[in-house]
Image (cartoon, rainbow, N blue to C red):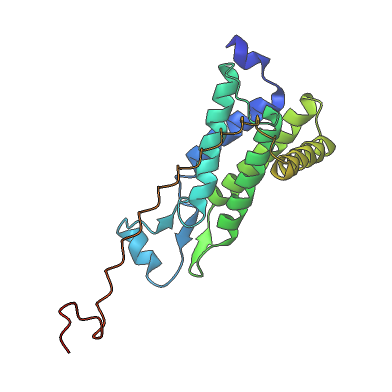
Amino acid sequence: MDTLAQLSHGAKLVLGAAIAFLIVSFFSWFDYNGPGSEFAEAFGGDTGITMWHGVGWLAGLIAIVLVVWQALRIANIELELGVTPAMITAALAILMVIFTFIRFIDAPGVFGRTFWAWLGLALAIAVVVGAWMNMQAAGEGVADIRARVSSMTAAGGASATAAPEPSAQEPPAPPVPDAPAEPAAPAEPSPPAAPAADDDPTGTA
């Protein structure tokens, strides 16, 4: 409880609104108003659609991540992510309200929005307000976000274009001695010439 009390009012608003948003997300955001809706309601048929359809599941997933992120903050678990915790909370809150708004306006033609849809959108906006208050409490603003993003982009570009450091020069390999020349093969003696016909040793004509 002491750690929870140390959270800023904005962080508490983010945590409470995100939990309430998750609860509301399981109610029917849209009800069927087309032909036969009276009979379906009379027989107890379920004609409602919750937020967890279409792109709405992304908003619900981000809300869960927000709750877990705030729980890590309460447990004093620090994660090195390159940006401040308040900036991470603000980024998640903005994504959550964007996907919630898309789900809110993406209603089928024969379905009408219910009170729960309006309440869910209001809670998503409350999460963004709490994230902004949390950044103000941390002494951060839009200029700090731009500066941090610019520094991260510049650092990434510099690391990508930096030339690799030369490695230690290896000593040259010793020269390979030439193979000894093979001795020349002795020349074969030429065969004796055949005696001419005039040089007959028998002296016969």
The C terminus: image quadrant: bottom left
**Who's the residue at 39% across and 66% down the image?**
37
Q: Position of residue 202 (x, y in %)?
A: 15, 79
**Who's the residue at 78% across and 37% down the image?**
151
Question: Where is 6 relative to 125, above or below?
Answer: above
Question: Where is 80 relative to 180, above or below?
Answer: above
Q: Residue furthest top?
A: 2
Task: Report how many numbered discs are placed on residues in the image.
Answer: 0
Q: Is residue 183 left or right of residue 191?
A: right
Q: Position of residue 156 (x, y in %)?
A: 71, 41
The quadrant in which residue 152 appears is top right
The quadrant in which residue 3 appears is top right
Q: Is residue 14 left or right of residue 154?
A: left
Q: Position of residue 101 (x, y in %)?
A: 62, 53
The N terminus: image quadrant: top right
Q: Is residue 61 left or right of residue 183?
A: right
Q: Position of residue 87 (x, y in %)?
A: 71, 34
Q: Is residue 185 visible?
A: yes
**Who's the residue at 50% across and 66% down the image?**
108
